[in-house]
Amino acid sequence: MRLDYHGLLPEAVGFLLLPRFSMMAFFSAVEPLRIANRIAARPLFDWQLISEHGGPVTASNGMTLLADRAIGEVHHLPSLAVCSGFGPEDTLSRPLMAWLHRLDQAGCVLGGLDTGCFLLAEAGLLAGERVTLHWESLPAFQERFPAIETSDELFELGKRRFSCAGGTAAMDMVLEVIARRHGSRLAIDVSEQLIHERIRTRRDQQRMSLARRLGVHHRRLVEAVALMERHLETPLSLAEVARRSGVSLRQLQRLFEQHIDSSPRAWYLKLRLERARHLLVETDMEVLSVGLACGFTSGSSFARAFKAYFGVSPRVARRQ
């Protein structure tokens, strides 16, 4: 592998911590850097924690980390990872947006861990880029930023941008960076120290296979559920789901009841309503727009179905 880094060591990396950031994604990104330094017996990487005002930042798990510097004290960085979690756009202020633009203009490579790409997109810094996010947040991102190309892969590493799905995907992304910078042998040694038996590539899937998630291995049933998951905004008729899955409508009904204790209609509705709840919580889309994006033809039909399933109206669910 041809190494792609020939700059000064240690290579400086910034982590912008935003309120309710994902601690798991952050540690998964930092620990491989620390271990790489130890194995190499020299400082290959140096990192600093940055917050908007320089104060401590509380993660989504309630733990608080102290920042090293405020954004106003940082004028140049080779790379910066935006670390966020729930409600990322709530944390984007004008000073923060201006700072990100200044770093970009100075040549900083910008990226997002977990939902960090929401902020970069809101700041207008992802035009022409391909990014990935946590699978749960990806539909909300696609609805809000339809012009930005997305993938459902573990991570994306470009020349000026990077992104990962969060969680342990950050570890795989950083291991790939270590391999590119300092060789695959070091990346493998770091992975073994982390008891990470296989370095996943960017093309590995974020989620378990559908068969494992469902706990069933009937191919026709798995195909039917996959069709439903791919057609939430414009739902297919159950007859069409059955036809594309290669079974009759009666067989489809029997498969669902036998293997997952649900009717096909109820399962399909559950998928659409769960997607709607994610959009309500993670975006500022109008309630009607959320309903339409999840296959409902009117606000009233969406509200009735949502309340019947979750026990509260869409508006109350958003406030909660």
Image (cartoon, rainbow, N blue to C red):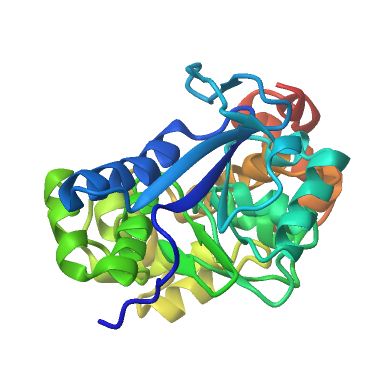
Q: Quadrant of the C terminus?
A: top right
- Whether 213 is drawn above or below 121: the answer is above
Residue drawn at the location 33% of the way across and 53% of the way down: 44
Q: Quadrant of the N terminus?
A: bottom left
- Whether 9 is drawn above or below 30: the answer is below
Closer to us: 16 or 108: 108
Closer to us: 190 or 319: 190
Residue drawn at the location 56% of the way across and 33% of the way down: 21
Location of residue 119 in the rendering, given as x and y in whole percent from the top left corner: 71, 49
| In-image side of 9 versus 152 (left or right) | left
Evaluate whether residue 196 shows in this view.
no
| In-image side of 300 versus 105 (left or right) | right
Number of numbered labels in the structure image: 0
Location of residue 153 in the rendering, given as x and y in whole percent from the top left corner: 43, 66
Asked where in the image residue 127 lies, by quadrant, the reply is bottom right
Location of residue 258 in the rendering, given as x and y in whole percent from the top left corner: 27, 50
Location of residue 311 in the rendering, given as x and y in whole percent from the top left corner: 65, 23
Evaluate whether residue 318 shows in this view.
yes
Asked where in the image residue 256 lies, by quadrant, the reply is bottom left
Residue drawn at the location 18% of the way across and 48% of the way down: 41
- Whether 135 is drawn above or below 262: the answer is below
Residue drawn at the location 74% of the way across and 68% of the way down: 146
